[in-house]
Amino acid sequence: MHAIILLGAPGAGKGTVAEDLKQQVGIVHVSTGDMLREAIRAGRPVGLEAKAYMDKGELVPDNVIIRMVQERLEAGKPEDRFMFDGFPRNVRQAELLDDLMPKCGGRITHVFMLEVPREIVIRRISNRRVCRQCGAVYNLIGSMRPKVEGKCDVCGGEVYQRADDNEVTVANRLDVFHRETAPLVEYYQAKGVFVRVDARDRRETELQILQQLGLSSQ
Ligand code: ADP
Ligand code: ZN
């Protein structure tokens, strides 16, 4: 199977874009953050281990993440096109993914960096709410508000603010992004798969990605 990677600061819109493209073109959305939150909710040991790191805005140890990703890849079908959101997050994870991909009979075809000014990501994150039940993402400001306050449009579940979407943790997540994840730009540029995307507008972002993937009708 082939893979596409979405890079970007917290709040850049990786999860939203990946969900939209899943609906539109059937890519398989793989979010390590969602997988970890699901593990916490289900009370699995891996979730308990991860939670302390997530609450502080630190990266969960690479071995935990890579084991989770490997299991997910093994459960995939050869024709799947994976879109990774929130993974890899540092050079070590990128190297481990490079070892795994050939074993899945595929390669990384595109790496998109979703670029959004810092003021906008901070505003997006402080107004972000998610569904506890299905993970759907909302924003209290603008067109992504839940139709009924506090309830998920999709499943009726409770819409809440993530524990790590507070001011202190967000500042740390942004630092971690610049320190650990930004070096992946050079890593993937060297492989000739890197594409920068202006991600201020949701539809424009998706259009740019679809064009790069050769899937756009425009
Ligand atoms: P965001 O992109 O908004 O920070 P995510 O849901 O991707 O949100 O990540 C939330 C938290 O989950 C991170 O701060 C980190 O603690 C953990 N996490 C998610 N993916 C990874 C990963 N690939 N490596 C290490 N930690 C991760
Ligand atoms: Zn829901």
Image (cartoon, rainbow, N blue to C red):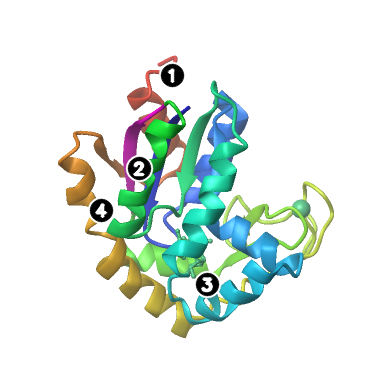
**Considering the numbered disc 3 on the image, is that residue within a helix, a strand or a loop?**
helix
Q: For mark 4, what is the residue?
A: 184
Q: Quadrant of the C terminus?
A: top left
Instruction: Say above or below: 4 vs 26.
Output: below
Q: How far is mark 3 from mark 1, CA to CA?
A: 33 Å
Ligand 1 within 8 A of label 2's CB? no
Q: Nearer the viewer, residue 82 or 136?
A: 82
Whichever of labels 4 and 1 marks the residue nearer the N terminus, that label is 4
**Considering the numbered disc 1 on the image, is that residue within a helix, a strand or a loop?**
loop
Give coordinates of residue 180: x percent, y percent: 29, 66
Identify the magenta region: 106-115
How crowded is the residue under tag 3: few (<14 C-alpha within 10 Å), some, or many (20+)?
A: some
Give coordinates of residue 174: x percent, y percent: 35, 71
Q: For mark 2, what is the residue?
A: 99
Q: Nearer the viewer, residue 204 or 189?
A: 189
Q: For mark 1, what is the residue?
A: 215
Residue farthest toward the top in the current orientation of the protein: 217
Whichever of labels 4 and 3 marks the residue nearer the N terminus, that label is 3
User: Cβ–Cβ below 8 Å for labels 3 and 2?
Assistant: no
Q: Nearer the viewer, residue 56 or 116?
A: 56
